[in-house]
Image (cartoon, rainbow, N blue to C red):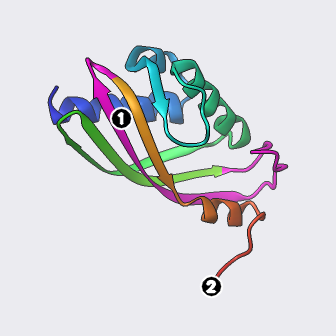
Amino acid sequence: MSSDELKSLLKRITEEASNNGEYAVINELLAPNFITHNFNVVPGPQGYIQFLTLLRNAFPDFHIETEDMIAEGNKVVSRGTITGTHKGDFLNIMASGNKLEFTYIDLWRMEEGKFVESWLIADMLKLLQQIEVAPQTD
C-alpha cells in the first residue's frame, strides 16, 4: 500500500469516526485483533468504538484537527490538536463545562489492508488542567 493510501485511510478514521461519530469505517478498516496501546481499550473494532463513544459522550463537540501526517512502509503517524467541551462525565470526572485544547501524536500500523495497532501520545496533563482536576503550572 502506498504512503498516500495509508494517509487516506487514517484520514477516514479521523474524519468519519472520531469527528463525526460514524463508526462503520471502524469495522471496515480495523482488524478483528486490533489493539490500541493506550487507555486500557478492549481489543478489536468494538473496543475502539466503545472508546470513541466514551470520548464523544464526554466531549460532544470532540474534534481532531490533523496538522501533519507521515507514512512509511506499513505505518502512518499523525500529529495535531484535539478540541472539545467537557459536557459529560470522563473517567469518573463530572462535566466541568470547560473548553479544552491539547495536542497529540498517533502512530498506526497496518497488515493486509487493515489497521492492527495504534499508539497515542496526548498531552493528558493539559487536558486534566483544562477540566480542573490537575493544578495549573507556569
Residue, x 49% and y 45% (percent of image)?
A: 64
Quadrant where the C terminus is found in the figure: bottom right
Specify the amino acid type for callout 1. Lys
The question of residue 101 being in magenta is answered with: yes
Residue named by callout 1? 11
The Cα–Cα distance between marks 2 and 1, rounded to whole angstroms, is 35 Å
The answer to whether 29 appears left or right of 50 in the picture is left
Question: Horizontal and vertical percent for residue 19?
Answer: 52, 36
Q: Provide residue 120's location: percent of width, then percent of height.
A: 47, 47
- Identified at 41% across, 14% down, the residue is 28
Q: Residues within 10 Å of mark 2 (few under 14, many from 20)?
A: few
- Location of residue 102 with respect to 12 vertically, above or below: below
Q: Residues within 10 Å of mark 1 (few under 14, many from 20)?
A: some
Along the line of sight, which residue is nearer the eye, 59 or 37?
37
Residue 35 is one of the magenta-drawn residues: no
Give the left or right position of residue 118, taking residue 137 as reference: left
- Residue 91 % position (x, y): 75, 45
The label on residue 138 is 2
Mark 2 / mark 1, whichever is N-terminal: 1
Residue drawn 81% across the image and 50% down it: 93
Number of marks in picture = 2
Query: What span is colored magenta in the figure?
Result: 85-114
Q: Position of residue 45 (x, y in %)?
A: 51, 20
Residue 49: which quarter of the image?
Answer: top right
The kind of residue on which mark 2 rests is Asp
Residue sitting at x 49%, y 15%: 24
- Position of residue 79 relative to residue 117, above or below, is below
Q: Residue furthest bottom?
A: 138
